[in-house]
Amino acid sequence: MSGQRASMRRRQNLFRWVVVSLTLVFFGLPLFSMLEFTTRDSAGHRTAATWSALADFGAISTRYPDLRDGFIASIGLAVLTVVIMLVLLVPTMTWVRLRLPGLSRTVEFVCLLPLTVPAIVLVVGLTPVYAWVTYFLGGNAIWLSFAYVVLVLPYAYRSLDAGLRAIDVRTLSEAARSLGASWTTVMVRVILPNLRTAVLSASFLAVALTLGEFTIASLFSRTNLQVAMYLIGKSDAQISIAVGLASLVFAFAILFAMSFVGGQRNSASPLTRLRRRKETA
């Protein structure tokens, strides 16, 4: 029996290594090809000229102003999209779970609806809205965050819904209210700390989608990072590919850094901290 278990364990380990290896090849080969392309000159010799030019921020900003504007716009879009998404979804989903459970299916349907709408159809529908947005707020690409919030709703909703299902929201909120906490304190100091993983997951998805979005920005004639890469690719393919590879590494670094947001948790629970403040008041 022990021999059969050992043999099965070896087969499982072998299967895991095969799957991991194939996954690494599948994702790593295109990245290696991008790096290979950007380190060859027209004669086929190895060179670092493309990466040296990309590292010269002053020269690259002067030569490719769209790249600078697109990078700044994408960073702003990622931050604003995450903020709007969290402010819109977290209180709404919490309130529905606490006070209006009968509307949970309706909220779920509304949040998942963008999955069924193609991007081109979404742009057509949002064109009259963005005519007024441009009139009142201007034509800055940062206002594409309103459309991006619609795009990330399905993914953010699933992440936050899983987090809310994993905790007893009603008991936590009622206990906090009985200790004298306001609804704002309940949301910020009790609910959000227990949704930390779900909030970070939703933020990861929002940042990844925002940094990689091209269709809506292009059709609305706004310049984000992906549109800037497309424009540069018409004149200098190597710089465009290098920017694409650098943006992938940058996005990975941002997502990796976001996983450490908040640092270590306090060993005391949110309700315990509220109770201590109540006793010392």
Image: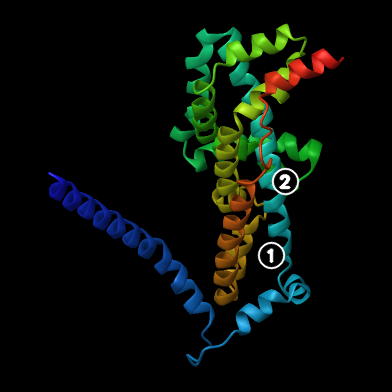
Q: Quadrant of residue 242?
A: bottom right
| Residue at image coords 74%, 14% | 183
Asked if one can make out residue 150 in the rendered structure from this viewpoint, the answer is: no
Mark 1 residue element:
helix
**Quarter of the figure that contains the N terminus:** top left
Residue 178: percent from the left, percent from the top?
Answer: 72, 6
| Residue at image coords 22%, 55% | 10
Between the C-alphas of marks 2 and 1, the distance is: 15 Å
Residue 191: percent from the left, percent from the top?
Answer: 64, 23
Question: In the rendered image, which residue does mark 2 sit on?
Answer: 142
* Of pointers 2 and 1, the one earlier in the residue sequence: 1
Q: In this rendering, would 138 be left or right of 5?
A: right
Task: Name the amino acid, label 2.
Answer: Ile
Between residues 267 and 175, which one lies in front from this camera angle?
A: 267
- Above or below: residue 4 compared with residue 102: below
Q: Quadrant of residue 145?
A: top right
Between residues 267 and 199, which one lies in front from this camera angle?
A: 267
| Residue at image coords 55%, 46% | 209
Asked if one can make out residue 268 in the rendered structure from this viewpoint, the answer is: yes
Q: Residues within 10 Å of mark 2 (few under 14, many from 20)?
A: many
- Above or below: residue 117 compared with residue 218: above
Residue 93: percent from the left, percent from the top?
Answer: 59, 20
| Residue at image coords 67%, 55% | 223
Task: Name the amino acid, label 1.
Answer: Leu
Residue 143: percent from the left, percent from the top?
Answer: 71, 42
Question: In the rendered image, which residue does mark 1 sit on?
Answer: 67
